[in-house]
């Protein structure tokens, strides 16, 4: 290794901040002459301007609102990671999520950013990716590629969040304290993990009362076991970090079959009879196919995904969630969804998720890039609901400079559920939302 005249941290900052040029593609400081050992930083901002048709009965600080318009930071991230030796890798990610005018309804608008990931990893075989052993706070997950998504490369402006199955219940925004092994052996890409779930009572929200429907248990603690396996028919997907791309925009030829599972003993509990408490194991599993490839000598590109998901959290488990919710109250007790844009996102049952996008010619708009229209559909049959959950999204990405600078427009249609006198929860209407996202990633 070459001798360095500057302290390592100072040299990296100087190279990343002052050494960048218009042609520089990344903020990277090489620790070896061949670039195999390095430090690297990235930044990400996803800014949303959104209109939302409110769920019936919605209020904002007590004021009834049939619709809302808001600005928000869906995600902001700083990544800092590097290959320190042939076998030692580290990764950190810092940032915040879902920051809009209601982010801290308790009155503290200085919402704290936090570490999403902090991990250390050791490559067992010096010159291959057969086996990497790691540990720390990490998104390594078992359910699907969208349970550990590279959010800078997602096609649909947002990931299918229901696949981050325990998000902010027993994890920290989909991350858990885990020991894991991952690697690539031939065409097989795998990851397995043992995780230490957080107690649900430390997530900052009131713990749901114990009742006839399962909720995450407040008693004791059990480990969570996860595995995810991919068969790469064509190109292998990158394996630097645990994150998985949404779309490669035609830069790779990827056709994959994928399967994953998460299991935890006594993860949820419910009232069985009278005051007796019963416990359920949580078992979540999936099978899926993913294709992302250039067409006609890279003039066009196709990205497509289809997955089936069986999510057994326990007896009649159901949870509403609203992404960066623009409202904080609902005056109509019959509306099951709750406030703003929330809907039944997580539950015990079966789901199908599909998405497809088509990148138009790279030079379609000259120096201003090209367009990539897309659609997605999610269907869920949850035990606690009398009707199915259907979510439809359609939009277009203006890829000004691939994922580094892109402007996206998305329209979403979601269901509204209400409680009936006979106890059923049925779909009674649909509600719309639309947003524009600008992403900068470098």
Image (cartoon, rainbow, N blue to C red):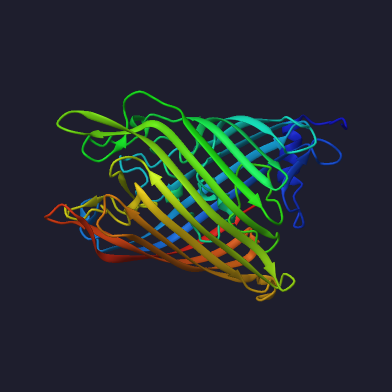
Residue under the image location 40 percent in, 34 percent down: 170
Q: Could one spot residue 121 in this view of the protein?
A: yes
Image quadrant containing the N terminus: top right
**Who is closer to the viewer here, 293 or 75?**
293
Give the left or right position of residue 425, taking residue 311 as reference: left
Q: In this view, does 88 lie above or below 238?
A: above
Q: Position of residue 16 (x, y in %)?
A: 72, 44
Give the left or right position of residue 8, taking residue 267 as reference: right
Q: Where is residue 256 in the image (x, y as percent from the top left)?
A: 62, 55
**Who is closer to the viewer here, 263 or 58?**
263
Q: Residue 404's image quarter?
A: bottom right
Q: Could one spot residue 54 in this view of the protein?
A: no
Q: Residue 4's image quarter?
A: top right
Residue under the image location 59 percent in, 55 percent down: 153
Q: Where is residue 232 in the image (x, y as percent from the top left)?
A: 67, 52
Q: Position of residue 334 (x, y in %)?
A: 17, 55
Q: Is residue 63 above or below residue 32?
A: below
Give the left or right position of residue 205, taking residue 80 as reference: left
């Amino acid at each position: 290794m070459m001798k360095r005249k500057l302290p390592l941290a100072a040299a990296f900052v100087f190279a990343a901040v002052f050494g960048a040029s218009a042609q520089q593609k990344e903020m990277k400081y090489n620790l070896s002459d061949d670039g195999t050992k390095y430090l690297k930083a990235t930044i990400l901002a996803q800014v949303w301007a959104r209109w939302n048709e409110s769920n019936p009965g919605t209020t904002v600080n007590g004021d009834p609102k049939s619709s809302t318009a808001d600005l928000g930071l869906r995600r902001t991230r700083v990544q800092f990671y590097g290959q320190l030796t042939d076998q030692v890798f580290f990764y950190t990610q810092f940032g915040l999520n879902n920051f809009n005018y209601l982010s801290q309804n308790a009155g503290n608008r200085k919402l704290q950013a936090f570490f999403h990931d902090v991990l250390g990893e050791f490559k067992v075989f010096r010159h291959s990716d057969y086996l990497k052993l790691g540990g720390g706070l990490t998104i390594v997950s078992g359910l699907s590629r969208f349970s550990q998504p590279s959010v800078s490369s997602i096609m649909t402006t947002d990931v299918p969040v229901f696949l981050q199955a325990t998000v902010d219940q027993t994890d920290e925004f989909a991350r858990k304290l885990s020991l894991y092994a991952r690697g690539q052996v031939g065409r097989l890409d795998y990851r397995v993990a043992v995780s230490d779930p957080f107690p649900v009572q430390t997530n900052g929200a009131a713990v749901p009362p114990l009742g006839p429907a399962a909720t995450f248990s407040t008693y004791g603690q059990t480990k969570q076991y996860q595995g995810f396996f991919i068969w790469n028919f064509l190109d292998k997907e990158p394996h630097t970090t645990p994150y998985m791309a949404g779309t490669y925009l035609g830069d790779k030829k990827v056709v994959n079959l994928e399967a994953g599972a998460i299991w935890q003993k006594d993860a949820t509990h419910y009232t069985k009879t009278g005051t007796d408490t019963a416990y359920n194991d949580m078992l979540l599993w999936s099978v899926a196919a993913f294709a992302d490839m250039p067409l006609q000598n890279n003039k066009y590109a196709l990205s497509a995904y289809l997955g089936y998901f069986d999510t057994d959290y326990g007896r009649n488990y159901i949870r509403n969630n609203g992404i960066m919710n623009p409202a904080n109250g609902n005056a109509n007790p019959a509306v099951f969804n709750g406030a703003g844009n929330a809907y039944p996102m997580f539950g015990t049952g079966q789901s199908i998720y599909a998405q497809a996008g088509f990148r138009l010619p790279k030079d379609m708009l000259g120096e201003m890039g090209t367009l990539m229209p897309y659609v997605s559909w999610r269907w869920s049959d949850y035990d606690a609901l009398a009707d199915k959950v259907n979510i439809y999204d359609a939009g277009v990405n203006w890829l000004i400079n691939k994922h580094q600078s892109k402007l996206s427009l998305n329209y979403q249609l979601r269901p509204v559920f209400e409680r009936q006198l006979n106890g059923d929860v049925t779909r009674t209407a649909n509600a719309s939302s639309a947003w524009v996202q600008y992403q900068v990633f470098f």
